[in-house]
Image: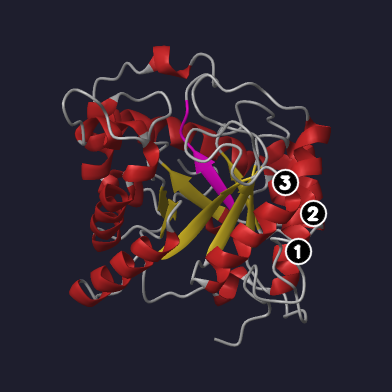
Amino acid sequence: MDSLAAAPGTGPATSPLPVLRKSRPAAQFKDLPTDRTLVMGILNVTPDSFSDGGKHATADTAIAAGLRMFYGGADIIDVGGESTRPGAVEVGVEEEQRRVLPVIQALVKAGALVSIDTTHAATAAAALDAGAAIINDVSGLSMEPEMAVLVARSKAPYILTHRRGNAGTMDSLAEYGNVADEVAAELAGVRDKLYAAGVAPEQIILDPGLGFSKNEEQNWALLQRLDVLQAMGHKVLVAASRKRFLGSLLTVAGKASPPQERDAATAAVTAISAFRGAWAVRVHDVGSSLDAVKVAARIAPAPRAEAAPAVPGNG
């Protein structure tokens, strides 16, 4: 591989940060592969994320991890500076930006396509200025409705995630009749707000919000009914990586498997989601999911046609 960086420990520097040799042209959303499901690598620049909190808590270690994912084949690197797990403590905007902006700048310089994982419009705007191309808002506009104005103005792709409540309350709000239909209906309601702000249909990417205000059975039901979201006419992102419902499934001797032992199960979800037409998967372990989407693409080579989204103002 024509790498931009020396592997940590092999170059003249002793820092864990790979040594950048030259810049690459900025990656473009329009240039992403269209012949398979995409793989979005998760990069948490946090001390308290459920799976890898503290592992990449400094800019140097986070950049090194992001470059490894990028060189390993990740199509998108999703950078976040605030944990969104149930019960997570909120982080101020200034601290969030201190964590993520240097990382975004370095990854963009290396040629990676970066998304910003944030619920704050100010952080999203700063990240776009730093070179990020996608906004991933797990709050679904519930934290800062002004995010819709930024999305419309910037024309950036926007990942609209289904979630009820916030990190402190979401687990108590997992009551549904038909979870797939209700999630789709609630997402459609938020989509109308995006349309009203001037966001174009093609900017919107839907995420069913696995693990956010859903119990284990509801998560599985959503994975079985991705077609309900696809019928809304937008790209669909599946983010199941290492989540609690996978750990519960893999229980041994009454003990759920820890997050780091859930990558094989994650890859299985990736393969099935890709086979069913998911636009992208968001994962911690890029390599196994990249293999999975390539296999799925060979088994299901037919193009994934997207239904026409509802025209703003007509439903």
Mark 2, mark 3: which one is toward the viewer? 3
> Residue drawn at (30%, 23%), measured in percent from left and top?
215
Where is residue 16 shown, x and y percent of the image?
69, 60
**Taking 109 as reference, is 194 above or below it?**
above
Residue range in magenta is 158-163
Instruction: Give the number of callouts.
Output: 3
Where is residue 99 shown, x and y percent of the image?
75, 43
Closer to the camera in the image, 11 or 270: 11
Closer to the camera in the image, 112 or 170: 112
- The reply to whether residue 80 is in sight is yes
Q: In the rendered image, which quarter is residue 97 located in?
A: top right
Q: Badges 2 and 1: C-beta atoms under 8 Å apart? A: yes
Where is residue 281 shown, x and y percent of the image?
41, 55
Neighbour class for label 2 at 10 Å: few (<14), some, many (≥20)? some
| Disc 1 residue type (three-letter) | Ala
Q: In the rendered image, which quarter is residue 194 located in?
A: top right
Tell me, yes or no, whether the highlighted magenta stretch contains residue 159. yes
Kindly state the secondary structure of the residue where label 1 is placed. Answer: helix
- The reply to whether residue 234 is in sight is no
**Taking 34 as reference, is 233 above or below it?**
above
Q: Which numbered tag is attached to residue 102? A: 2
Mainly helix, strand or loop, the magenta region? strand
Q: Which residue is mark 1?
A: 106
| Disc 3 residue type (three-letter) | Thr
Q: CA distance from mark 2 to mark 1?
A: 6 Å
Lower position in the chain sequence, tag 3 or tag 1: 3
Q: Is residue 22 left or right of residue 65?
A: right
Q: Residue furthest bottom?
A: 2
Q: CA distance from mark 3 to mark 1?
A: 13 Å
> Residue drawn at (60%, 87%), measured in percent from left and top?
2
Q: Which numbered tag is attached to residue 46? A: none
Neighbour class for label 1 at 10 Å: few (<14), some, many (≥20)? many
